[in-house]
Structure formats: structure tokens, C-alpha cells
């Protein structure tokens, strides 16, 4: 497959305002938020009034092409301000290059942002205007900018910027999506909702409480457009997306069980692992309360731990130790978390990883049970590790739900459940593979849905590992089983996170790359066209692109059930 090269798309979007969309058509990074592999855009905005301001230059993957594109539109030496919605080490290369060309620049960011920026640029004397929420910045011609700090544990320095002249709210991470394309705005916004939802689940759901506070702060502004860091600008679907965000937050806060995810990360690797674990937890219907040890006060950590059904601690190893804020948090956890709470440990390290050992030993000595074995990730995780972490998170959440479920074990199936149980479905194994990541799931809720084009629907429980590979555009294979128990038994097992689902089975790759089970009766090569949220499942509609009967003599395995409340 040929992929277009990275480029920068430039377009005027409002009075005196232009967007620079640095585009990557391929997956940009191995982080769970990029897992749908639709590429992304890093959006930067230029306001040219009496003073010139640049908002959110892109990360180092784009430094060169971005600066070239910028130089063609504006004299970089005349830029007065660079406003930063958040500062991360990845942006440092571009900021350094900009500052070298244009030493007249004054940076504008939040207070925690200023600390990060001085560190990232290794320059204690950087000219920085700190915005705490009260101060404005007048660029002239009506662009009298306002600033709204919207901190959260992942981005404690997040700062939104509002321009009353254009009524654009520059939202940084809020309202983004990782999609690449030519569309600058969100006309036909419904088609972006699935990607925005996925982005929300990965980036926002683990700190839903803080996102709620941010929306509250922003709700008084008269906004015509959201200008997020990634994906299309939000103009047409602004009201609906804001409403959806509120609903998605509500879904999180309504969950019965919470896991406290307590971590620190100096360079972002441990945070990436945390995000993958968090996604695995939230997709299983358990809420995550993220705590960044560096920015949380002891009372906040104590309260989160006391309220949660389990806790997971993560730390990088720096100089053979866990950073001091992690050690302090560990002390608070040991003093306040009852022994019945399920525990977990993870961390990114370089060569020895002592911090992970310290967390493991102290919690073990403290008498806690572990929901998964300590996860040790060398430097940056790859996509297999991300999958592993996500599945470990799901297992952790399921263990918590099992422990806390009020058992109504002997309640007989109601007549409705018994009747629903009489619906028959052929028994199949759905398989999918993208890059190095593959998964499989036994499925009986599959129906033919259309004839032209040939299409089917599959119901996938939200906490299934396979669910991540079943988004719009993804290929997969339905392996229809013959009568007999062998393959069925293979896939009925409980799999450990990241475990190869296909070990010991004869498989081949279909044309779309997904595994075909040679022992199946027939297989269908499919592409996901749409998905709909139906209670605790996703209903996936897919077209069948190709298929083959592998065994003419057997009959289709059928799944007989006694109740519609069980598989
Ligand atoms: C100053 C410094 C000291 C480090 N010391 C150790 C160490 O003692 N042992 C180790 O295993 N890794 C060490 N590392 C590697 C980090 O643990 C590794 O880069 C990790 O990915 C950082 O995680 P983070 O991105 O979440 O901060 C060190 C890295 C730095 C920059």
C-alpha cells in the first residue's frame, strides 16, 4: 500500500487567522490513541493582527516541513508570540528551531507549562508570559486573547485560548480526533463521531472529572468554532459534539467501580503505558481516576485510593529509583488502601528498572493481591506491548467486577431470557490482524444483514480484546466452524494479556491479512463499514469482500443456548 508523504496544508479559517495542518497519513506513534491507524494532523494556528501569534507548533516529526511552510507565509522573525496549549518533550525540537531563527519570540503558556518549557528547551532564561486565567493578551484588531487553564493529570499544563474577534476557541487536546484527510472543517460531522469517541475514550476518559470541570469553565464563552490540536476543526457539529462529550463523561462517572491509576512520567513513556492500561479498564465498564503524582496533593491521592476498588501504580526508573513524588504516593497508598483492594504495577525503564521492583516489593509486603504481573516496558512501548497493556487493564477491570458483583447466582433465567436464548446463530471465530497485533473471538451473534453488497452484522462485547480491531475500515475474517468441539474448545479458554490466540492451530493469511483457520468449514473476508452502540455491545456492520468453503462435507456448528443472558 502506498502512503502519501507527510505535508503541511495551509488555509485561512477566519479573519487574520490561518491553520497549518501538518499531516501524517500513516499511524504517527505507538500510543493507544493512534491505534485506529488513520493518520493524524497536528494543527497549528497563525493569527496576524498588529502583533503576530503562533498557536501550538507541531512535534519534531514535522519540524522541517512545518518551518518551510510557515516561512512561505510569514516572516518568522516578525512573530511576537508562540502560545502553547501544552508543552511536551516531543515539541521541543520545533520550538528550539523556531527560537533560533526568531529570538524575539515570547512564549505564552500556563505556569506548569513554563516549568516544562524551561526544562525541554534547557534554557532557564526563556522569555515566557505565564497565563493563570485572569491575564489577557492583546494582539490588536480585536484579537484580545483570553486564556483558560484546563489542567488534567495527563496534561497538567493544558491551556485553552479564546479569540473574541473570531470566536474561535483553541482547545488543545479537547475535541480532537486522529484522522488525516483534506477536510479542514467538520462538514458531515457525523462521520467523525466514531473517531472522536475513540479519541475521547483514550485521552479523556481516564480523567473524566477534570474534563467535566474544563467544559464547565469553557461554557460561558461565545464560541463559533473549536480549533483542536488534531483532526478537523469543529464548526458544524459543535453543539452536538459538546453534548456528546457531556454524555460520555456521564457514562464514566456513572460506573459502579473505580480504579485509581497513580503514576508519574518524566519523558512520556510511562504515561503511554498508563493510557493503554486505562483504555483497557474503561472499555470493560470500570471508571479510571488518573492521578499524576507530581501534581496531586496527598489528600487527593488518599481520597482516590479510598474510593476505588483497586489501584495501579506506575513509575519510570531514574537514577536507580522511583521519583520522589511516586515514593510519596506509595507511602500514602500503603497507609490508606485496605488490603482487599486489587493492586497493579507498571513502568517504563531503560536498563535496570528498580522503580518497578520497589513498587512490587512494597505492595507485596503490604499484603496486596495483584490483578496482573508487574508490567515492565523498556523505553517506548511498541504496538504489541500496547495491546498487552490494554488487555491487562481489561483483565484487571473484569476481576474487580467479579469481586464486587452482587451474586444472584441461582436466579433462574426469566421466560424472556429463555425465549431470547432460543435464537440460533452459527458458531464462528472472528479473527483480525493489523501490523503485529492480532486477535480472535468466538462469536455466535452473527447475522446476514444485506444481500447487495453482501453484508453481515456481528455483536462484539465492549470489553473484548478484538473490539479495538473492529473499527470502521478495518478488515477481519469470519471463520465459520463445522460441528465438533476442537476449535471451539481452543477459543473458549481464558487468554492472558497479549497471549497468542493461534498457537497450536493451523492458519493461513487471508488476502486482507487476517488469519484463516484451516480447520473451519468456510471463511468470509470482511471490512467494517459502520458500528452502532447497543448497550453493552458494539453492533458492527461489515461487507463481505470474499469467501471460500474449506470443507464441503461437514455441517455448520450451531450454538444452542438456554438463556438470552448468557453466551
Ligand atoms: C536521567 C536519567 C536516569 C535514568 N536512570 C535509569 C536507571 O537507573 N535505570 C533504568 O532502568 N533506567 C533509567 N533511565 C531510563 C528511563 O527509565 C527510561 O528512559 C524511561 O522510559 C523513562 O520513562 P518516562 O518516559 O515515563 O519518564 C534513566 C533515564 C534518564 C533520562
Image (spheres, grey):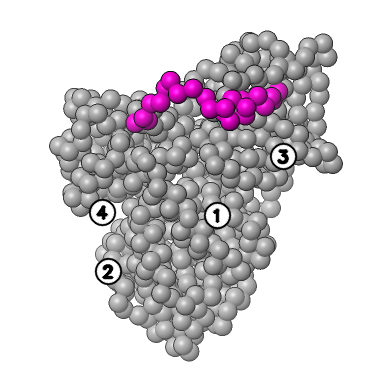
Q: How far apart are marks 2 and 3 (CA)?
A: 57 Å
Q: Name the residue under label 1.
A: 196
Query: Main structural element of the magenta stretch: helix, strand or loop?
Result: loop
Q: Name the residue under label 3.
A: 542
Residue at 63% over, 52% down: 25
What are the residue bounds of the magenta stretch?
404-426
Q: Is residue 377 visible?
A: yes
Instruction: Kindly state the secondary structure of the residue where label 3 is placed.
Output: strand
Query: Looking at mark 1, is its residue's CB closer than 8 Å to ligand 1?
Result: no
Instruction: Kindly state the secondary structure of the residue where label 2 is placed.
Output: loop
Please tell me whether mark 2 or mark 3 is closer to you in this view. 3
Query: Looking at mark 2, is its residue's CB closer than 8 Å to ligand 1?
Result: no
Please say if the residues under marks 2 and 3 sit with CB atoms less than 8 Å apart: no
Instruction: Kindly state the secondary structure of the residue where label 4 is placed.
Output: loop
Sooner in the amino-acid sequence: mark 4 or mark 1: 1
Residue at 54% over, 22% down: 500
Sooner in the amino-acid sequence: mark 1 or mark 3: 1
Q: How far apart are marks 2 and 1 (CA)?
A: 39 Å
Query: In front: 101, or 61?
Result: 61
Queried whether the magenta region covers residue 391, the answer comes back as no
Figure quadrant of the C terminus: top right
Sooner in the amino-acid sequence: mark 2 or mark 4: 2
Q: Name the residue under label 4.
A: 295
Q: Where is residue 271 in the image (x, y as percent from the top left)?
A: 38, 45
Query: Looking at mark 3, is its residue's CB closer than 8 Å to ligand 1?
Result: no
Amino acid at each position: 500500500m502506498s502512503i502519501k508523504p507527510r505535508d503541511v496544508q495551509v488555509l485561512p479559517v477566519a479573519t487574520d487567522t490561518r491553520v497549518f495542518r501538518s499531516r501524517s497519513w500513516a499511524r504517527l506513534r505507538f500510543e493507544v490513541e493512534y491505534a485506529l491507524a488513520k493518520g493524524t494532523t497536528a494543527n497549528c494556528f497563525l493569527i496576524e493582527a498588529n502583533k503576530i501569534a503562533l498557536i501550538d507548533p507541531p512535534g519534531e516529526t514535522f519540524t522541517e516541513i512545518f518551518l518551510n511552510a510557515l516561512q512561505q507565509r510569514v516572516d518568522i522573525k516578525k512573530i511576537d508570540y508562540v502560545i502553547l496549549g501544552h508543552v511536551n518533550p516531543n515539541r521541543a525540537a520545533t520550538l528550539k528551531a523556531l527560537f533560533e531563527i526568531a529570538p524575539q519570540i515570547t512564549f505564552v503558556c500556563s505556569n506548569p507549562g513554563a516549568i516544562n518549557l524551561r526544562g525541554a528547551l534547557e534554557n532557564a532564561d526563556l522569555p515566557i508570559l505565564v497565563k493563570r486565567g485572569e491575564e489577557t493578551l492583546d494582539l490588536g484588531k480585536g484579537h484580545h486573547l483570553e486564556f483558560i487553564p484546563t489542567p488534567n493529570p495527563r496534561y497538567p499544563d493544558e491551556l485553552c485560548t479564546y479569540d473574541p474577534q473570531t470566536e474561535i476557541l483553541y482547545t488543545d487536546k479537547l475535541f480532537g480526533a486522529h484522522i488525516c484527510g483534506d477536510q479542514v472543517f467538520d462538514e458531515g460531522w457525523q462521520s467523525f463521531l466514531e473517531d472522536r469517541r475513540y479519541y475521547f475514550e483514550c485521552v479523556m476518559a481516564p480523567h473524566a472529572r477534570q474534563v467535566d470541570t474544563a467544559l464547565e469553565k469553557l461554557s460561558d464563552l461565545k464560541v463559533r468554532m473549536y480549533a483542536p490540536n488534531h483532526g478537523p476543526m469543529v464548526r458544524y457539529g459543535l453543539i452536538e459534539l459538546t453534548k456528546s462529550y457531556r454524555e460520555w463523561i456521564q457514562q464514566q462517572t456513572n460506573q459502579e467501580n473505580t480504579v485509581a491509576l497513580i503514576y508519574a512520567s518524566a519523558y512520556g513513556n510511562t504515561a503511554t503505558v498508563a493510557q493503554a492500561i486505562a483504555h483497557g479498564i474503561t472499555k470493560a465498564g470500570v471508571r479510571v481516576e488518573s492521578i499524576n503524582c507530581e501534581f496531586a496533593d496527598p489528600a487527593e491521592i488518599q481520597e482516590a485510593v479510598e474510593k476505588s476498588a483497586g489501584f495501579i501504580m506506575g513509575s519510570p526508573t531514574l537514577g536507580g529509583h522511583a521519583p520522589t513524588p511516586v515514593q510519596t504516593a506509595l507511602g500514602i497508598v500503603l497507609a490508606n488502601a485496605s488490603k482487599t483492594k486489587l493492586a497493579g504495577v507498571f513502568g517504563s525503564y531503560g536498563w535496570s528498572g528498580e522503580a518497578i521492583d520497589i513498587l512490587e516489593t512494597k505492595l507485596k509486603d503490604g499484603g496486596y493481591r495483584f490483578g496482573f504481573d508487574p508490567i515492565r516496558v523498556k523505553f517506548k512501548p511498541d504496538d504489541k506491548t500496547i495491546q498487552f497493556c490494554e488487555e491487562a487493564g481489561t483483565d484487571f477491570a473484569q476481576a474487580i467486577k467479579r469481586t464486587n458483583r452482587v451474586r444472584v447466582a441461582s436466579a433462574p433465567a426469566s421466560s424472556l431470557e429463555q425465549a431470547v436464548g432460543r435464537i440460533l446463530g452459527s458458531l464462528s471465530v472472528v479473527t483480525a490482524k493489523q501490523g503485529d497485533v492480532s486477535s480472535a473471538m468466538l462469536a455466535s451473534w452473527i447475522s446476514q444483514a444485506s444481500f447487495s453488497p453482501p453484508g453481515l452484522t456481528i455483536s462484539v462485547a465492549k470489553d473484548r480484546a478484538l473490539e479495538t480491531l473492529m473499527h470502521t475500515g478495518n478488515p477481519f475474517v469470519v471463520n465459520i466452524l463445522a460441528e465438533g468441539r476442537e476449535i471451539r474448545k481452543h477459543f473458549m479458554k481464558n487468554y492472558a494479556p497479549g497471549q497468542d490466540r493461534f498457537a497450536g492451530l493451523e492458519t493461513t493469511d487471508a488476502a486482507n491479512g487476517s488469519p484463516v483457520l484451516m480447520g473451519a468449514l468456510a471463511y468470509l473476508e470482511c471490512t467494517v463499514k459502520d458500528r452502532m452502540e447497543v448497550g453493552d455491545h458494539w453492533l458492527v456492520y461489515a461487507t463481505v469482500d470474499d469467501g471460500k468453503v474449506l470443507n464441503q462435507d461437514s455441517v455448520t456448528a450451531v450454538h444452542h443456548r438456554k438463556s438470552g443472558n448468557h453466551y
